Amino acid sequence: MDSGDALLRASEVAQRLGYAPKTLANWRSRGIGPRVTTLPSGGIRYATRDVRAWAQGIEQEPSQLARETAERALRQLD
């Protein structure tokens, strides 16, 4: 398994992005944010590669908040 295949808990992703876990839950309910993997047990995980791809995508967004979030995520995932 390479580091891109690592599955992170929502709390880990939230911490790396600098948001509360509830923010990720809100994003999930709205269909935005990094792609989610649902485990057979019902647990939510995020593949590192999916978080990185999402951050790289929003890095191009015009809003300052989106750019800062992307930069923070990319730094934390490297």
Image (cartoon, helix red, strand yellow):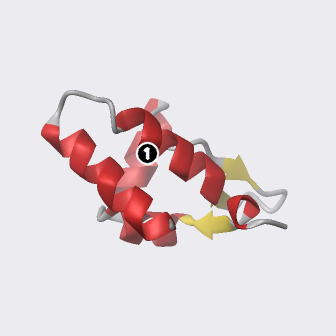
The image shows residue 56 at horizontal and vertical percentages of: 45, 41
Look at the picture and state if 18 lies above or below 50. Answer: below
Residue drawn at point x = 63 percent, y = 46 percent? 36
The image shows residue 59 at horizontal and vertical percentages of: 34, 38
- Circle 1 sits in a helix, a strand or a loop, which is it? helix
Q: Nearer the viewer, residue 11 or 26?
A: 11
Residue drawn at point x = 41 percent, y = 41 percent? 27
Q: Which residue is mark 1?
A: 55
View extreme (left): residue: 64
The image shows residue 46 at horizontal and vertical percentages of: 62, 56
- Mark 1 is on which residue type? Ala
Which quadrant holds residue 41? bottom right
Look at the picture and state if 24 lies above or below 75. Answer: above
Asked whether residue 2 is in view, the answer is yes
Residue drawn at point x = 39 percent, y = 65 percent? 75
Q: Which quadrant does the N terminus fall into?
A: bottom right
Residue drawn at point x = 74 percent, y = 57 percent? 42
